[in-house]
Amino acid sequence: MDDVWTVEPYRGDRRVIGALLGRAFRDDPLTVAVGGAEPRRRELWSIHEMTWLADAALRRGYVDVVRHRGEVIAAALTFGPAARAVQGLGCLFGPVRADEPGAAIRYARWLAFQRARRPRAPHVYFPIRGGAAAYHGVGATSALMRAVLRRVDEAGLPIYAEIDSPVGRRFVEKHGFVVEDESTLPGLPAVRVCWARRPASGAG
């Protein structure tokens, strides 16, 4: 990719971000465990979930994107300490649209497990970042992470993420996150999730 790309805040159509991230996470371990084995059905579920999260971030958090010649090629969603819980029953309609009713039960288990472990102290929650497959390896998601971390450091807050793949773990560790815990999800034994935290700027 040439150098005609920019990192910027996004205030556009949630469906653009939902489609981008939904396809990026179609084969993610948690998406496979929740959305089912059939790729197209799982992709529909993933796109619906990511569109719902993008809508929540546009209204109550931040959406940052990388554009290449005007096209959005990577996106990151973050929520600040004042944001309410960003995931809820809206996401459960995804499995219905994807014709995979069992996904609603599996996703509800994940939500309950996730909420029970999330820190109570003020922090920035960083649930999702990803990019188009055609642009992997060009540094787009690292550029997004740097932009997110600059904003978080200015606020003097720690940032918290959940990771369910070795690639994701290596990525956040490269940017200063420390894995504080990891566990297999109840009812989803194939998925092992790490909880990672990056301290506030200047904190140990």
Image (cartoon, rainbow, N blue to C red):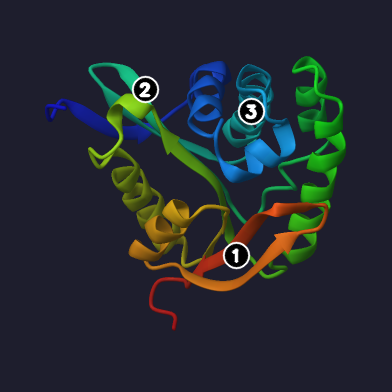
Residue in the picture at 21% in, 28% down: 5
> Relative to residue 58, is residue 119 drawn left or right?
right
Q: CA distance from mark 1 to mark 2?
A: 28 Å
- Residue 116 image point, x, y percent: 80, 63
| Viewer-side label of 1, 2 | 1
- Residue 88 image point, x, y percent: 80, 39
Looking at the rendered structure, the kind of residue marked 1 is Trp
Number of other residues with Cα within 10 Å of mark 3, as a class: few under 14, some 14 to 19, many 20 or more: many
Looking at the rendered structure, the kind of residue marked 2 is Val
Q: Earlier in the sequence, mark 3 or mark 2?
A: 3
Q: Secondary structure at mark 1?
A: strand
Which part of the image, by quadrant, shows the N terminus? top left
> Looking at the image, can residue 195 be seen?
yes
* Residue at mark 3: 46
* Residue at mark 2: 72
Determine contact: label 3, label 1, CB under 8 Å: no
**Where is residue 104, by image quadrant?**
top right
Determine contact: label 1, label 2, CB under 8 Å: no
Residue 195 image label: 1
> Relative to residue 138, is residue 24 drawn left or right?
right
Residue in the picture at 64% in, 33% down: 53
Q: Earlier in the sequence, mark 3 or mark 1?
A: 3
Determine contact: label 3, label 2, CB under 8 Å: no
Q: Secondary structure at mark 3?
A: helix
Which part of the image, by quadrant, shows the C terminus? bottom left
> Looking at the image, can residue 154 be seen?
no
Looking at the rendered structure, the kind of residue marked 3 is Ser
- Residue 99 image point, x, y percent: 80, 17
Q: CA distance from mark 3 to mark 1?
A: 21 Å
